[in-house]
Amino acid sequence: MKEKLSDIIYNAILKDIVTGVYTSRDFISEAQIAAKYGVSKAPVKEAMHILASEGFLVSYPKRGYMINVYTVEEINKIQEVRRVLEELAVRKAIALASDEELSALRFYRKENELQYRPGETINTKFHMGIAKLAGNSFLEETLYPLLLKASVYNITGKPDVENFDHIVDAMLARDADQAAKCLIDDICFM
């Protein structure tokens, strides 16, 4: 099935937000994005409306959009929700996943910041990998935008692959409490 033009534009803008191409002080207009990608304003308008509804952009009528800037308190609330969701994910993944599936979470030892979704880094991919192994699509859908919002602020900087190893080791040992502790330690507050 062919991807809609508005989805392509949405993914391009989201990637630019997450990777810092646009800063919190930049106004982004529909005309600017339409010109950048050589498309009409209709798919741009749809994409930007969705990004605003998801909390990535703030709409300023007749001026354009700006990157939504979260307060420290809001980022910490996002991280708090992530901790709860990801602890559930790690416990379910331990119960459901095979050793091979759990070991596959060590992809970060082979990849160098490979991105497979707009703006997604090794950190996001690792945490989403655990969520996927939990076998609950609603958990994945809820967690993904939270990870992206937190990644805009790059709270931890470079991913702590040593901590990822500890999480995977505990998961392979089927030690849910230790895996949850390591995972929670990986989700930092500002």
Image: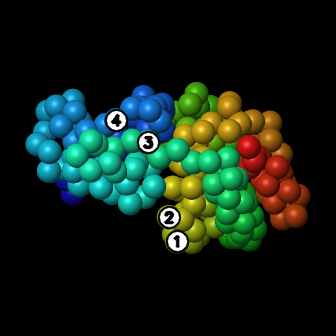
The kind of residue on which mark 4 rests is Phe
Mark 1 and mark 3: Cα distance apart in space: 26 Å
Q: Which residue is mark 1?
A: 138
Q: What's the mark number on residue 141? A: 2
Q: Is residue 137 above or below residue 156?
A: below
Q: Amino acid at mark 3?
A: Ile
Badge 4 marks a residue whose secondary structure is strand
Say whether marks 1 and 3 touch (CB < 8 Å).
Answer: no
Q: Position of residue 139 (x, y in %)?
A: 57, 68
**Along the viewing direction, whichever of 90 and 59 lies nearer the viewer:** 59
Q: Quadrant of residue 54?
A: bottom left
Residue 156 position, x and y percent, is: 71, 36
Q: Earlier in the sequence, mark 1 or mark 4?
A: 4
Number of other residues with Cα within 10 Å of mark 4, as a class: few under 14, some 14 to 19, many 20 or more: some
Position above or below: 56 against 88: above
Disc 4 or 3, which lies upstream in sequence? 4
